[in-house]
Image (cartoon, rainbow, N blue to C red):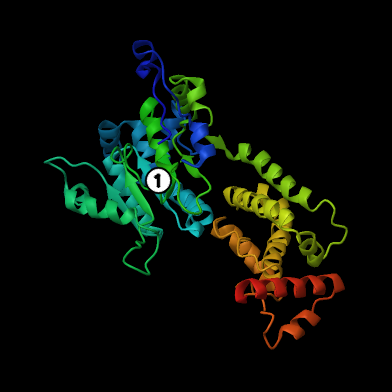
Amino acid sequence: TGTPLLKSQKMDKAFGGYIDKYKINEAVEDGATVRIIYEGRQVQSDVVGDSLDALFEEYFKDKSDEEKREIKKKYGVERAVREAPARIRWVCIDLLKHYREKIQPNGFKAMIVVGSRHAATVFKKTLDDLEAPPSEVIISGTHNDPAYLSKYTDSAHQKQVIKNFTKPLGTDTEKEDPTSFLIVKDMLLTGFDAPIAQVMYIDRSLKDHTLMQAIARVNRTYKGKACGYVVDYYGLSDYLTDALKDFSSEDVEGTYYTLKDEIPRLKAAHTRVASIFAGVKGSDVDDYVLHLKDEDTRQPFELAFKKFAKQMDVILPDTAAKPFIPDLKLWGKVQNAARNRYRDPGLNISDAGAKVRQLVDEHIISTGVDPKIPPVDLMAANFKETVEQIKSPESRASEIESAIKHHITVNL
């Protein structure tokens, strides 16, 4: 699962050491898990003393003095501020923007971890008020729960909610389910396996091993899932640093990365693709496609472009990806043209993420080409007309050669 053992749990002294150890970064490299990207968010409640009191007055300015005293008595100032409907609305607006831009386009789901059962219901109501995609609440119950809590604690209902949440996102078939958000407090933070979950939004205190296990909910592999995200609205960075100290450094290397860590990865992936076309003199798409004539060149391009496209999907729509979008579009068009020219179905980026595929497809279509139309067969009536539309004599010869090879392979 990618969750390391605490130092205090190590048994090497008693049992003479490990036969082998499987570290977090090794699991990512092997494709057993995906890496986790950590994003910290600034929320106007991470303050103390007079400032916290001022925020309390701001959030509850519509309450009477007696009501304010009761709120302070029941919840305390800090919890009251953190769970104030006005603050939760701010958090929901932000996480919805993040979800709609980074997660939903690729068909993934989200978990929201909150500080109390009451907060879970406030998050649910706020998301509904904001017309968010469907959400569900999973919380534990007690005998004396009021109705607004007990409606979410029925075990049979919870089992169905969990079953639905693990299904692919959608409404087209019975195998899909539209539930996008699962709101929890303590339940499902350990042992819950839902690879469809790509992001965890955290708005509560989590520490030590519980924190490590919780964030591991989003590191499961799934088709098209380049990474998992942890978006922190509570201010857990110090807790995360402290938690990592409880483990051997070699075990927790690569536990999580920040978006800043991903920029060098993107630059390196971009450089790898650019190096393949280092010898191309022209600037036309045909020049690039001709450069990929040999399979020994096409295969490295396929692998390098897929890695670049996946890394773009990790960072989009962040502005850090903007300088690389022109090359993504160009190379995407080259990839599509090469696939058609050389009849090579292996050249595709179907697992790179919908955000990237949409950018590439829109660019290809804008230039008058439908990426979904297959290459013209050698024996087709319009084959000659298609070849004559190709400007370069060398490219025309390449198209004819590839069509002949494909026809022989398929029919003889």
Q: Nearer the viewer, residue 396 or 159?
A: 396
Residue at 33% x, 47% y is 183
Residue at 39% x, 21% y is 6
User: Can you tell which quarter of the image residue 289 is in?
Assistant: bottom right
Q: How many marks?
A: 1
User: Can you tell which quarter of the image residue 82 is in?
Assistant: top left
Q: What x and y, as percent, mark residue 11? A: 36, 16
Quick one: which residue is furthest to the front in this view?
412
Quick one: which residue is furthest to the left in this view?
143
In the displayed structure image, the side of residue 263 where residue 224 appears, left or right: left
Residue at 35% x, 14% y is 15
State whether residue 4 is above or below residue 219: above
Q: Nearer the viewer, residue 411 or 133?
A: 411
Q: Give the structural element (helix, strand or loop) at label 1.
A: helix
In the displayed structure image, the side of residue 340 where residue 286 appears, left or right: right
Residue at 44% x, 25% y is 49
Q: Amino acid at mark 1?
A: Ile
Q: What x and y, as percent, mark residue 281? A: 88, 58
State whether residue 60 is above or below residue 279: above
Quadrant where the image shows the N terminus: top left
For mark 1, what is the residue? Answer: 88
Q: What x and y, as percent, mark residue 410? A: 61, 73
Q: Nearer the viewer, residue 98 or 228?
A: 228
Quick one: which residue is furthest to the bottom in this view?
381
Q: What x and y, as percent, mark residue 28? A: 51, 38
